[in-house]
Image (cartoon, rainbow, N blue to C red):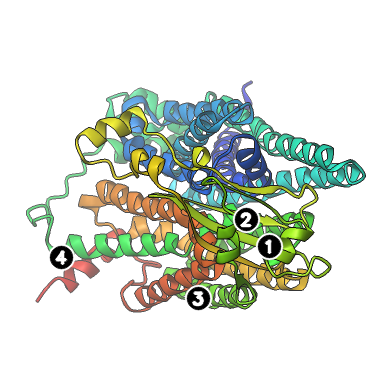
Amino acid sequence: MNPLASPAWSTRYLLFIAGMGGLLYGIDVGIIAGALPYLESTAALAWKLNAQQLGFVVAAVLLGSVLSSLFAGLLADLVGRRAAMVMAGTLFVASIPLIALADGYVALLCGRLLQGVSGGLIGVIVPLYLAECLDARRRGRGAALFQLLLTVGLVAAALIGLVQARSVQAATDAAAALPEAARAAAVLAAKDHAWRGIFWMCLTPGLVFTLGCLMLAESPRWLARRGCLAAAHAVLLRSRTADEAARELDDIARPQSRAAGASDPLLSRRYVLPFLLACLILACTQATGINSVLAYVVTILNRAGLPGASANVADVLLKVLNALMTVVAVLLVDRKGRKFLLMLGSAGIVVALLCAGLLFRASEGRQRDVRAQVTRAVQDDGLALRLDPATLRALGADPAGPPQVLTVAYAYGPFTNVASIRSDDPALPALNARRADTVEPDSVIGRAFRRLHVNPFPDPALGARAPLAIETARVGPVPTPAHGWLVALAICVFVASFAVGPGVCVWLALSELMPTRIRSNGMSIALLVNQFVSTSIAAVFLPTVGRHGYSTIFFFGAACSVVYFLASAFLLPETRGKTLEEIEAHFAGAAKP
């Protein structure tokens, strides 16, 4: 007897595989945080990538998610929910060897784009599949499980990063007695192996999800819309009694004509108000910087003063906290309501980001402007600096004093880059600024757009002629571990506040605010706004912190969170316990003169 023939086992299996989809989505977002500190070494030293290119590698997942969100619904309607989930899992599995075996920028970027496309499909289609397959009693549990497993995916990604961080630390300690060149090569090899190993460890859950989807039944509602009522009935019988399956099939097959309000123009306030409010809520959610902070958290904590292994431990604790607070949000969302939790969460985010910004402002205020000294070190339109004792003295720092960090922003015409080095790095790498590593040639698409005078990217011809210009150069002591743990505490409050409020409530608010007539298209556009804001912040994160410091990013997020709180308090209606028709009537009433 097939165990999946039992209604209970069929439902559990469906929830397990859907939960694995949430796990993959979380890994998509979180895996780069543990890999980035080691990937930066390979990217900068072996591949000669600049900060903008590395930012694109991080943002590629978000960009791929934006692209896939445009056609996810159409794909699910065309080939079916199950087939679309199999395709999403296949793309994720294919991305792993492409990234882990990458030998340059293009392969790495393509692999990350594939991961993003996979994550975007999973984020749309799996919740849609759950909503169409589960009955009303289990639908909330299914959505909560997907969100919970998403946070578990973030924890898994952090644990994988911690394992590799310990191996890198062990390799660094073992290479301490080697000559300088051999020590640098050994540390670089350990870091290169670490980030590749982090991605290889993600292959197993991808295979489980992809193969598991093959054993799922198709959505009964998708089958019914194509006239396959017998097949839809058979699917319903897998998780319902015969009477329940018959009643639900009758509901699915019954025409759902909604004549009321259909004559109103789409630009009437009953549609525009909830649509704009949903877009504002989603834009503010990403403007807090949550995805970029999760992606760069190990790097942020390293810069705040925590050593590598401690930063990875803090990263794991952060992800565990995210999962625990998501459980709290799931328990409270139907008791306290969406509005209350969004207000509570956004207020906590404001406080946390202000604290993190003030902590970084205090440490960054101790940095000194050394632009003149660094400019004097420029030779033949290039720069090569190593924070050895002689360089530290030239920059006005005491070689016997605390470790120093040097951050330089430079440009060749319109092409800019940011580089940073620390004097306590065992490999003692050099900060190199070269035209060949900074000025990027046009791609085929770029050249075609340039002929039409519509290319928004810098012109390589201008970069080829421009001299090296040092825009900013600052040196200062590396913050203490105590300072790093204070920053980690502020980020923990930020993540906890996000998880208990926007993390769960924003998606419920999105689906509940949209009127029936515009729900599918309105949600697609609002999600596109959400992904666009997230991708934009990720793309400018590294250049911004290089020129203006981490405090600028945190203060910007705090300002956006103030807008978030005001929108939640004064514009967002409470939707707890209300039907979708009652919520739509609220906006229809607001539209009346």
Image coordinates for residue 409, horizontal then vertical, percent: 52, 57
The crowding category of the residue bearing disc 1, from other C-alpha atoms within 10 Å (few below 14, some 14 to 19, many at least 20), is: many
> Going by the picture, which residue comes out furthest to the top?
1
Mark toward the start of the polypeptide (3 vs 1): 3
Amino acid type at mark 1: Val
Of 332 and 320, which appears nearest the observer? Answer: 320
Please identify the quadrant where the C terminus is shown.
bottom left
Image coordinates for residue 476, horizontal then vertical, percent: 67, 69
The disc at residue 57 is: none
In space, the residues marked 4 and 1 are separated at their CA atoms by 54 Å
Image coordinates for residue 334, horizontal then vertical, percent: 48, 66
In space, the residues marked 4 and 3 are separated at their CA atoms by 31 Å
- Check whether the beta carbons of the residues at disc 2 and disc 4 lie within 8 A of each other: no
Number of marks: 4
In space, the residues marked 3 and 1 are separated at their CA atoms by 29 Å
Q: Secondary structure at mark 3?
A: helix
Q: Secondary structure at mark 2?
A: strand
The crowding category of the residue bearing disc 2, from other C-alpha atoms within 10 Å (few below 14, some 14 to 19, many at least 20), is: some
Q: Which residue is mark 4?
A: 269
Mark toward the start of the polypeptide (2 vs 4): 4
Mark toward the start of the polypeptide (4 vs 3): 4
Of 218 and 513, which appears nearest the observer? Answer: 513
In the rendered structure, the answer to whether residue 307 lies left or right of residue 473 reads right
Q: Secondary structure at mark 4?
A: helix
Q: Which residue is mark 3?
A: 350
The disc at residue 420 is: 2
- Check whether the beta carbons of the residues at disc 1 and disc 2 lie within 8 A of each other: yes
Q: Quadrant of residue 274?
A: bottom left
